[in-house]
Image (cartoon, coloured by chain):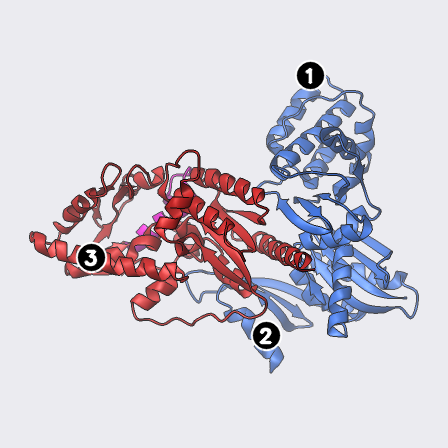
Chain colours: A red, B blue
């Protein structure tokens, strides 16, 4: 059986876990194509108009899997952390997607760890039962998958981007980037499905690198540090991913050698407007150069380029002024 | 005379200036873009060469504005820089000690915050052009007055009417409503200026620390009604520098001076380019599902530049031809 996984949204966090789990249970995993104009166009045509750009893109990825997979993995991810939520739009994904025609059946399993982290195993059991009645096999597949997932997170904490970490895990070696010139440490914050999707983000990571920056993201910081720093907020945020961004931002604000911070927000994303605002205030408070980029479906890259270029000019200028 | 050329290719106007070695503006040409940037750059250069005394020498050229890359290819620029850096460089030269730059152009508006001669923060308008020159232009045309008279008439008002400034479409219907109620033209125009200023300060200037000296530049700074509205809203004196509408070009020329001095010579192709035949065109690359819109520029039938492709297949081909 071929299980289709959309190369979108939480793919950037949990793909190794999902892939190994399904493969251990004897299934084959098929990914949708890389984000591209055609995928987005299909998404825009079918999505409800109120959702953000990454969710529209998700529609496109699901549609891309039609005909390629026997089933599409589309869990209802409510919460991945005790007393926290994932964006409400994720919660409605299976319901939104179900209305589309000509799709293979969906694997809709609730993943809700709001009350108890151990509820994860209930979800695992529910998914596994589609493939086998043998609970031991499901358990074994789960352990193996968690192991690989752990390695993936570790690699990212060592400074790799998701695509680089995946390439290492899967034994593909990508062309390693060799930065030259004067280096600047720039922190890039944003939802993983925005900043790591080269189409949505207009390849922001590689653009920053080619302009001589070393890019650090929230995924490079360990869970423990993120939690400790996020706890400084007077009140905890509802969203796991938002907490991660805020915690990582606070952490980086205290690190020496960080020259600037870029926050990427999707137009129409409620949590982004909130976390972006919080991070901006703290960055201003500690004198950190800060840039907020809002992405939407326009394909003109000039706006993003102008802002990035001007931001790096400003950071370099400031650095030079501090040096003298 | 020896000096440097600065070219600012904006959405509404193209500004070409010539500065002498000391950075003093000797010539300034302001043309409407009229949707044909290349032809207007050629026309502007022809005009400039006619105005310069015989035996003048161009020691460097810089381009800026949204059409900076295109113009840079055509003229052979020494410096191609974003408009934020260009404006900041020019203004800090003309008004030493400037702390805030308000810039409103045809389709974008920006704020630049400087401290001790260094840019510390900036912002540009996001996905909406409501607070920019195009809107004033349009409304002036609708009321059948020339944009040059706009500010003068607004100044005649003793009070102003409140007009919603959030969105250009709503502002227009609000304006029509007030006009049908019998409000006077000066009051409506003054209200419009205040609405734009309110929108600008809420949107672009949000959270920025606006300190004197405040410099207002860009095409809209010609409007005395806007100057008064800014002074009232900020309760600070507003300075409008001479050559306020070509400051981007001045900055580009200053950057060219720096770049040409570093290089030791200039890349300027000479005034002869005003007689060359340039053609631009675009095609959709069918190489992958990205379907990139590739733009190419030809000079007398020879391809001199291509861009727009995400993978670099077309743009790199031109660079390789040049090297070989």
The reply to the same-chain question for discs 3 and 2 is no
Q: Nearer the viewer, mark 3 or mark 1?
A: 3
Left or right, A24 with respect to A52, comes to left
| Residue underneath mark 1 | B181
The reply to the same-chain question for discs 3 and 1 is no
Secondary structure that dominates the magenta span: helix
Q: Residue at coordinates 66% horizontally, 73% vertically from top-left?
A: B301
Q: Which class describes the residues within 10 Å of circle 1: few (<14), some (14-19), or many (20+)?
A: few
> Of the residues under marks 2 and 1, which one precedes in the sequence?
1
Judging from the image, mark 1 belongs to the subunit labelled B
User: Which quarter of the figure has residue A309?
Assistant: bottom right
- Residue ranking furthest to the bottom: B324
Image position of A318 with respect to B78: above or below: above
In space, the residues marked 2 and 1 are separated at their CA atoms by: 62 Å
Q: What segment carries the magenta color?
A: A45-65
Q: Secondary structure at mark 3?
A: helix
Magenta region includes residue A136: no
The reply to the same-chain question for discs 2 and 1 is yes
Q: Residue at coordinates 73% horizontally, 51% vertically from top-left?
A: B117
Q: Nearer the viewer, residue A118 or A75?
A: A118
| Residue underneath mark 2 | B319
């Amino acid at each position: 059986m071929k299980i289709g996984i959309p190369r979108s949204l939480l793919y950037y966090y949990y793909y190794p876990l999902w892939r190994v789990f399904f493969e251990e249970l004897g299934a084959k995993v098929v990914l949708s194509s890389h984000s591209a104009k055609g995928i987005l166009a299909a998404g825009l045509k079918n999505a409800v108009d109120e959702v953000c750009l990454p969710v529209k893109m998700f529609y496109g990825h699901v549609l891309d899997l039609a005909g390629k997979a026997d089933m599409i993995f589309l869990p209802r991810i409510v919460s991945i952390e005790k007393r926290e939520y994932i964006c409400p739009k994720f919660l409605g994904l299976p319901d939104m997607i179900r209305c589309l025609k000509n799709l293979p059946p969906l694997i809709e399993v609730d993943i809700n760890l709001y009350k108890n982290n151990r509820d994860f195993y209930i979800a695992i059991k529910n998914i596994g039962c589609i493939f086998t009645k043998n609970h031991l096999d499901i358990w074994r597949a789960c352990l193996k998958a968690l192991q690989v997932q752990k390695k993936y997170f570790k690699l990212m904490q060592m400074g790799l981007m998701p695509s680089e970490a995946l390439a290492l895990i899967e034994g593909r070696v990508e062309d390693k980037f060799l930065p030259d010139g004067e280096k600047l440490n720039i922190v890039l914050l944003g939802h993983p499905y925005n900043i790591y999707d080269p189409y949505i983000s207009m390849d922001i990571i590689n653009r920053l690198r080619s302009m001589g920056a070393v890019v650090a993201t929230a995924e490079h910081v360990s869970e423990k540090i993120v939690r400790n720093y996020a706890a400084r907020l007077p009140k905890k945020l509802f969203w796991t991913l938002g907490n991660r961004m805020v915690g990582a931002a606070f952490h980086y604000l205290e690190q020496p050698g960080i020259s600037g911070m870029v926050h990427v927000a999707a137009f129409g994303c409620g949590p982004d407007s909130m976390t972006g605002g919080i991070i901006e205030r703290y960055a201003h408070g500690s004198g950190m150069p800060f840039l907020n980029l809002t992405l939407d479906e326009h394909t003109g890259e000039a706006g993003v380029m102008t802002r990035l270029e001007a931001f790096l000019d400003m950071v370099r200028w400031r650095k030079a002024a501090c040096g003298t | 005379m020896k000096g440097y050329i600065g070219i600012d290719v904006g959405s509404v106007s193209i500004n070409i200036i010539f500065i002498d070695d000391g950075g003093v503006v000797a010539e300034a040409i302001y043309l409407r873009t009229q949707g044909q940037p290349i032809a207007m750059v050629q026309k502007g250069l022809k005009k400039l060469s006619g105005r310069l005394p015989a035996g003048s020498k161009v020691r460097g050229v810089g381009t800026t504005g949204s059409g900076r890359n295109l113009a840079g290819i055509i003229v052979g620029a020494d410096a191609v820089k974003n408009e934020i850096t260009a404006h900041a460089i020019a203004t800090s030269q003309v008004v030493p000690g400037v702390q805030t730059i308000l810039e409103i152009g045809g389709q974008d508006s920006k704020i630049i915050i400087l401290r001790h001669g260094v840019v510390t923060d900036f912002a540009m308008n996001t996905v909406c052009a409501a607070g920019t020159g195009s809107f004033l232009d349009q409304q002036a045309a609708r009321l059948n007055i020339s944009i040059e008279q706009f500010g003068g008439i607004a100044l005649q008002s003793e009070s102003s009417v409140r007009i919603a400034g959030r969105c250009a479409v709503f502002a227009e219907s609000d304006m029509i409503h007030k006009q049908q109620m019998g409000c006077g033209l000066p009051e409506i125009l003054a209200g419009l200026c205040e609405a734009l200023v309110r929108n600008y300060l809420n949107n672009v200037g949000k959270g920025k620390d606006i300190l004197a000296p405040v410099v207002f530049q860009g095409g809209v700074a010609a409007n005395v009604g806007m100057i008064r509205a800014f002074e009232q809203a900020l309760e600070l004196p507003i300075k409008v520098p001479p050559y306020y509408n070509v400051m981007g070009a001045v900055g580009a020329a200053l950057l060219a001076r720096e770049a040409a001095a570093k290089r030791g010579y200039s890349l300027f192709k000479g005034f002869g380019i005003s007689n060359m035949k340039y053609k631009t065109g675009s095609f959709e690359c069918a190489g992958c599902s990205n379907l990139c819109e590739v733009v190419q520029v030809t000079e007398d039938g020879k391809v001199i530049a291509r861009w727009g492709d995400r993978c670099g297949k077309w743009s790199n081909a031109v660079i390789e031809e040049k090297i070989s």
